[in-house]
Amino acid sequence: MTKVVNFHSQNEPMVSPAEEDLRELTRLLAKYAPHDGGFDLAECSLHVVRSSVMYTEQTYTLSQPSICIVPQGAKHVTLAQDSFEYDQKRMVVYAAEVPIHVRVTKASADEPYYCLVIPINPKALNHLVLKVFPNGVPKCEKTRAIYVGESNARLVNAARRMMEIIEQQEDTDLLVPHVIDEILLRLLRSEVGPAVAKIGVTDSKIEKVSNAISWIKAHFAETIKIEDLAKHAGMSTSSFHIHFKDVTQLSPLQFQKILRLQKARELLRSNLLDVTSVAFQVGYASASQFSREYTREFGVSPSKETP
């Protein structure tokens, strides 16, 4: 189970989000997510996810640095050996791109699952970090890719106000960034603020790991040499190993394998290539090894996958 963190500042009362804020935020998200799926609010760089059904099968995705607020429904997330659920009472902050498995666990046609995703722009965050921590970011625990904690009533209220601005369509381009800054500032002022701040700090361990992750994503089908990957990240090999696993809970090769297998699943379900062709395309030299690892990961052999 993922460790629960505190998204409240030291002197802030631990108050649950107001029911009125949750209901209104749900209404507003429904307006911009008219059916199941994901929807971008391009002018605001926000993302809304809706699902009216629960899923027994876990879906793979790559998390992005972001804040996720769920006013209705619930989702279960697994990263490596850790898992957690977030809903009205819990929110999550993703600090890096990591391969996660997700499953909607509470949703219905009458009360769909809704999630507001607020991306974290490292450069914009760093500007705020300098204001909150003018004397430097305090030392904190090991940086992680995911932070889960009790929902902060003030953050949910700010999210509601932000969506109301979007609904009113008046000075959206001027006002929405200010509310996003408010949300980020409140996060930075919380007990987990020093850890969140690392997302925006240039040359931080999480930035270096993120650079390595971007390289692996672009070259997942190639043979990876850890020494070269560490050099790309600007770290020694031993330091890179430690910090990569601290952040992602995976080794670089485990990370690469997950990317390969998920891409293979997409190709198999598209019904365009046979198993052997898929294995070679995603970087496996042995079709039998691919089949073993695929079956271990998904619980079904690649030959039995259907689109």
Image: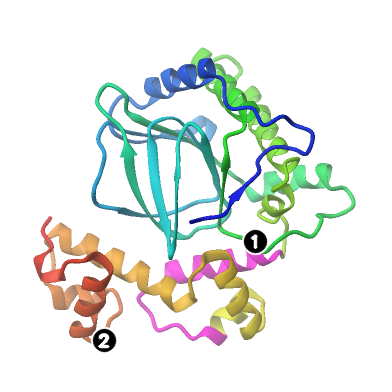
Q: Is residue 232 left or right of residue 47?
A: right
Q: Is residue 229 left or right of residue 129?
A: left
The part of the image, by quadrant, that contains residue 263 is bottom left
Kindly identify which numbered label has been placed on residue 166: none
Determine the main secondary structure of the stretch shown in magenta.
helix
* Along the viewing direction, whichever of 53 and 65 lies nearer the viewer: 53
| Residue at horizontal 10 percent and vertical 58 percent from the top | 306
Instruction: Tell me: residue 52, above or below residue 187.
Output: above
Instruction: Tell me: residue 231, above or below residue 122.
Output: below
Q: Position of residue 240 (x, y in %)?
A: 61, 78
N-term-proximal mark, 1 vs 2: 1
Residues packed near mark 1 inside 10 Å, few (<14), some (14 to 19) or many (20 plus): many
Q: Position of residue 295 (x, y in %)?
A: 21, 72
| Residue at horizontal 57 percent and vertical 14 percent from the top | 170
Mark 1 residue type: Thr
Q: Secondary structure at mark 1?
A: loop
Residue 178, magenta (yes or no)? no
The part of the image, by quadrant, that contains residue 255 is bottom left
Residue topped by disc 1: 143
Residue topped by disc 2: 285
Q: Position of residue 172 (x, y in %)?
A: 58, 21
| Residue at horizontal 72 percent and vertical 41 percent from the top | 190
Mark 2 residue type: Ala
Residue 225, magenta (yes or no)? yes
* Along the viewing direction, whichever of 127 and 303 lies nearer the viewer: 303
Answer yes or no: is residue 220 visible.
no
Instruction: Tell me: residue 71, above or below residue 144.
Output: above
Quadrant location of the C terminus?
A: bottom left
Start-end of magenta stretch:
204-227
| Residue at horizontal 24 percent and vertical 67 percent from the top | 264
Q: Secondary structure at mark 2?
A: loop
